[in-house]
Amino acid sequence: MKPYLIIVFFGLCLLLGACSGNDYSPKPRGYFRIVFPEKSYRHFDRGCAFAFDYPVYAEMQPDRSSDTRPCWYNLNFERFNGRLHLTYYDVYSQKEYESLVEDARTFAFKHTVKANAIDQKLISYPDRKVYGIYYAIEGNTASSVQFFLTDSVRHYFRGALYFNERPQYDSIQPVVSFIKKDIDRMIETFKWKN
């Protein structure tokens, strides 16, 4: 028998042996395991008209954008590649107050195109004169949570959570749920200083 026929014969035997009896199916795409830190908070009070608690695993940094104002901050969740943008305005008239509240609603509902749902929840802590609306935005949107707080007279504070990656709601949902609890704590402890 010729040597090349022996090689072809053994090659065919290996190929047939490899194909028989194995039911291979590709594994579904997986995501990295997320290890969440233990909940712990510190107090924010840096000379602004407000104070609140925020998580120790997030870093509070002044906003450095071109149109920044005093008391604008970013709460960076570096571990989760997310950022909570925090803005504050002194309110000088009823018209200005109404414009800011309408802006918050417009910014939240801008995500309607991609959102599966936008839930609104009223915020009311009359003992601290803290009122507002919390927008929980579900779906593949740029922002998952937005809210504003006001005393209805002089102060207006707004927050918006964004992630620095393409939105995929199913993959970031555990992180959003984790950070929502931190935002809830921020709102529950929020107070005006004057």
Image (tube, rainbow, N blue to C red):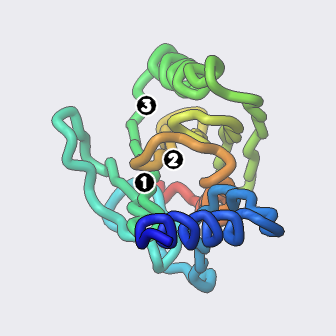
CB atoms at circles 1 and 2 under 8 Å apart?
A: yes
From mark 1 to mark 2, how far is it between C-alphas?
Answer: 6 Å
SS label for mark 1: strand
SS label for mark 3: loop
Depth check, front residue: 98 or 39: 39
Q: Where residue 32 sits in the image (x, y, percent)? A: 56, 69
Give residue 91's mark.
Answer: 3
Q: Is residue 149 visible?
A: no
Q: Nearer the viewer, mark 1 or mark 3?
A: 1
- The residue type indicated by label 1 comes to Arg
Q: Residues within 10 Å of mark 2 (few under 14, many from 20)?
A: many
- The residue type indicated by label 2 comes to Leu
From mark 2 to mark 3, how far is it between C-alphas?
Answer: 23 Å
The disc, 2 or 3, on the residue closer to the chain's N-terminal end is 3
Q: Nearer the viewer, mark 2 or mark 3?
A: 2
SS label for mark 2: strand
Q: Residue at x 61, y 35 (%)?
A: 140
Above or below, 115 against 185 in this view is: above
Q: Residue at x 71, y 63 (%)?
A: 19
Q: Which residue is mark 2?
A: 161
Q: Residue at x 59, y 73 (%)?
A: 34
Q: Which residue is mark 1?
A: 83
- The residue type indicated by label 3 comes to Val
Above or below, 53 against 26 in this view is: below
Depth check, front residue: 32 or 137: 32
The disc, 1 or 2, on the residue closer to the chain's N-terminal end is 1
The quadrant in which residue 89 appears is top left
The disc, 1 or 3, on the residue closer to the chain's N-terminal end is 1
**Number of marks drawn:** 3
Q: Where residue 44 sits in the image (x, y, percent)? A: 43, 70
Q: Residue at x 44, y 69 (%)?
A: 2
